[in-house]
Image (cartoon, helix red, strand yellow):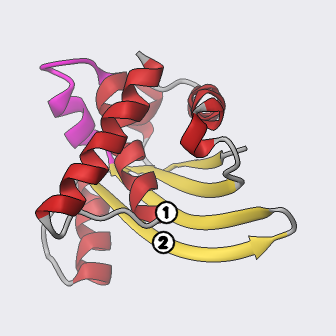
Amino acid sequence: MIKANVISGHSNWKKFLVQPNNYLKKRLNKLSKAPSFKRKNHEFSILLTSNREMKKLNNKFRKKNKITDVLSFPIKIKNKKKLYVGDIAISFEIVKERSKKTNFFLEFDKMWIHGYLHLIGYDHKRYNDFRKMHKKEKLILKSFY
């Protein structure tokens, strides 16, 4: 089973995600039934934050003094039967802006899925890796919508 702990760090999130823990629990229950995630016993945290905080985090941890949409901080901590895989931070303003073309939940799902895949070892530094990661993201999204 995959579990997310949600930390709300910006009040605007509550206008769209009234109960973020419940929302993610439903999504992760679906994800946990997918063949490639069936036996995953992962736990991670998601910080729902603002552009201002994202810029600070990006500068502190990546030495890039600019706003970004999603940040992933992988770490592996084995605890009983669960594996804590790390933390994700997501910018409200970027999700909201992108949702003007689609919808808020789709854009939010894209970001946390992207962040989660980074936590479990995917990256997009090379084109071939990008294709693999993008394919996995689309597969996960397809199971939700």
Q: Quadrant of the N terminus?
A: top right
Residue visible at 12% across and 61% down? 127
Residue type, label 2? Pro
The mark lying in front, picked from 2 and 1, is: 1
Q: Position of residue 93 (x, y in %)?
A: 23, 40
Q: Are marks 2 and 1 in contact (CB under 8 Å)?
A: yes
The three-letter amino acid code for the residue at tag 1 is Ile
Q: Badge 1 is on which residue?
A: 120
Dot 2 or dot 1, earlier in sequence: 2
Residue at the spot 66% in from the left edge and 46% down from the top edge: 2
Name which residue lies at 24% across and 31% down. Answer: 96
Q: Considering the image in quadrants, where does the C terminus appear?
A: top left
Mark 1 Cα-neighbour bin, 10 Å: few <14, some 14–19, many ≥20:
some
Residue, disc 2: 74
Q: Quadrant of residue 72?
A: bottom left
**In-front residue for pair 18/24:** 24
Instruction: Say if 32 sits above or below 10 in the image.
Output: above
Q: Residue at x 29, y 61 (%)?
A: 54
Which segment is the magenta one?
91-104
Q: Is residue 101 magenta?
A: yes
Identify which residue, 70 or 2, lies in the foreground.
2
Q: Secondary structure at mark 1?
A: loop
Camera-side residue of 127 and 27: 127
Q: Is residue 27 left or right of residue 40?
A: left
Q: Secondary structure at mark 2?
A: strand
Camera-nearest residue between 7 and 12: 7
